[in-house]
Image: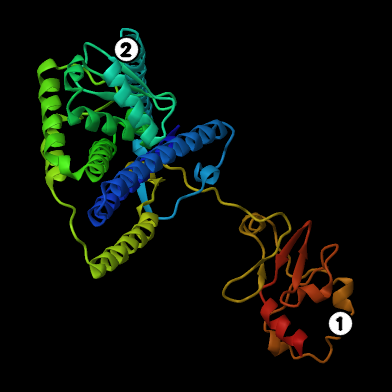
Amino acid sequence: MGPYSLHLAGALLTFILKVAAGFVLCLALARLLPSPRHRFLTWLGFLLASGLSWIALLTDQIVSLLAHSAATASFAGLTGRPPGEHLLVPESWSVWIGRGAELLGAIYLVVALTLLAREALKHLRLRAWLRHGKKPSAELQQIFEKLCRDFNIRRCRLIVLPHVSTPATVYWWTPRIVLPDVCEQLVPSPQMENILRHELIHTLRCDYLWATLGDLLCALLFFHPAVWQARKRMNMQRELACDLTVVESRPEQRADYADSLARFVRLAMLRQTPGLGVDFAASPSLLGTRIRHILAEPPQVSQWKKLLDDAAFVGFIVIFVSVSHALSISLDFSAQPQSQSQRLAAPAPARVLPARNTLVPHRRHNRLTVPVAYQDSLTTLPLQNRVPESDWQQSQDWSNQDVSTYGEPTFIAALPAGVSPASMQDVVIGELPGTAALSRGEHRAHEHHKR
């Protein structure tokens, strides 16, 4: 588990850094985008990209873990070492890294399953609450059907739920718009029509689906704060986009629409009822921002400002793509240096002796010498002053050779079996009983032989 845990830690650090860099990129892009609709798509894309990257990472690690049991080489050979920063970790940390990986994996499973179970429980509770709903009044139903025809919506239904405090939209395939009892009192006023228009825009945008996906991704990526911030910003831009659509259709009713929003936010704060889906009041902390956007006139942007924003938009994306490759981290174990006691306790390398009857070249005189083991054994053998000449020696003509050239007499013996005279140009071998030895004047005989 050591190499696998180290690879998993590197992959996790790489994922965290890249998600953080993506969040910074989306912050920069959101400042350049003037419309809340585009900013909503930016944060939604960030969440979806982060979730898909995490699922791909988990899938790759599971496949690698299954292959790790049969692998004998380093773990980097299974998944490939990512390009980028390469860090070395002391090998003595391998035990603690393995235990930490197991502990963090268990904690992640417990927390993620708990958050997913909470989301499932919320949907079950929503289904149970909708059973207590009742049909709206005829006048309210008539207004609702008229707006559905204007938006070309067919599968949406209207439900009045007594215990809720704010209008909300639930489900996305067969959407339901939930209204509190207080909405029956607003039927004659234009505020009710604006509220229904707001909720129908949520159904057209499938905001309940995106909100559910955001909750699931936050449950899977609960350890990364950028994901929670991205979901919060996505929800804010979602509400601003719906408010902008309502105001664009009825610009003369900006003040009434802002007043109805503040009224339902106060009611939600007093009742403290849990949110069922995509609430009209949303978070009370967003009330000031939403009211300012509702009452503000749309800004006028010049053409050159749009061109600069587009150029900066493309530039930020290019920078992110260039930097993202350098954010990959690869971890490996480093070899631990041996201490003085370990070096002393280490056994000395065994001395490898040459094979028997092997001639070893001498370093200084560039000649063949007998191995040390055989030289030691020759010291105990009696040497003769003269050895009978071999057939090869007798075949040579020594009559006209100068004795002074050689100095003292040379011990010559027959060549060993299988050795030709041509291979013995650098040495004259003396023959002893059962053993090959070197003569003391072999270098001189070598020079004469060359002549």
Local crowd size for mark 2, using a 10 Å CA cut-off: few (<14), some (14–19), many (≥20): few
Residue 215 at x, y = what percent? Answer: 32, 29
Tag 1 residue: 396
From the viewer's side, name the closer residue of 367 and 309.
309
Q: Amino acid at mark 2?
A: Lys
Residue 178 at x, y = what percent? Answer: 29, 20
- The quadrant of the image that shows the N terminus is top left
Look at 71% across and 64% down and name the residue there.
437
Q: Kindly report the distance in space between the C-alpha atoms of the residues bearing marks 2 and 1.
A: 130 Å
Look at 82% across and 92% down and name the residue there.
400
Identify the secondary structure beneath mark 1.
loop
Local crowd size for mark 1, using a 10 Å CA cut-off: few (<14), some (14–19), many (≥20): few
Look at 31% across and 63% down and name the residue there.
310
Residue 444 at x, y = what percent? Answer: 68, 83
Q: Looking at the picture, does residue 385 appear above or below residue 122? A: below
Residue 3 at x, y = what percent? Answer: 45, 38
Q: Quadrant of residue 221?
A: top left
Identify the secondary structure beneath mark 2.
loop
From the viewer's side, name the closer residue of 157 and 116.
157
Q: Looking at the picture, does residue 104 appear above or below residue 433? A: above
- The quadrant of the image that shows the C terminus is bottom right
For residue 135, which numbered disc appears in the image? 2
Q: Earlier in the sequence, mark 2 or mark 1?
A: 2
Q: Quadrant of residue 301?
A: bottom left
From the viewer's side, name the closer residue of 418 and 387.
418
Q: Amino acid at mark 1?
A: Gln
From the viewer's side, name the closer residue of 304 and 177.
177
Q: Give the foreground label among 2 and 1.
A: 2
Look at 37% across and 30% down and name the residue there.
148
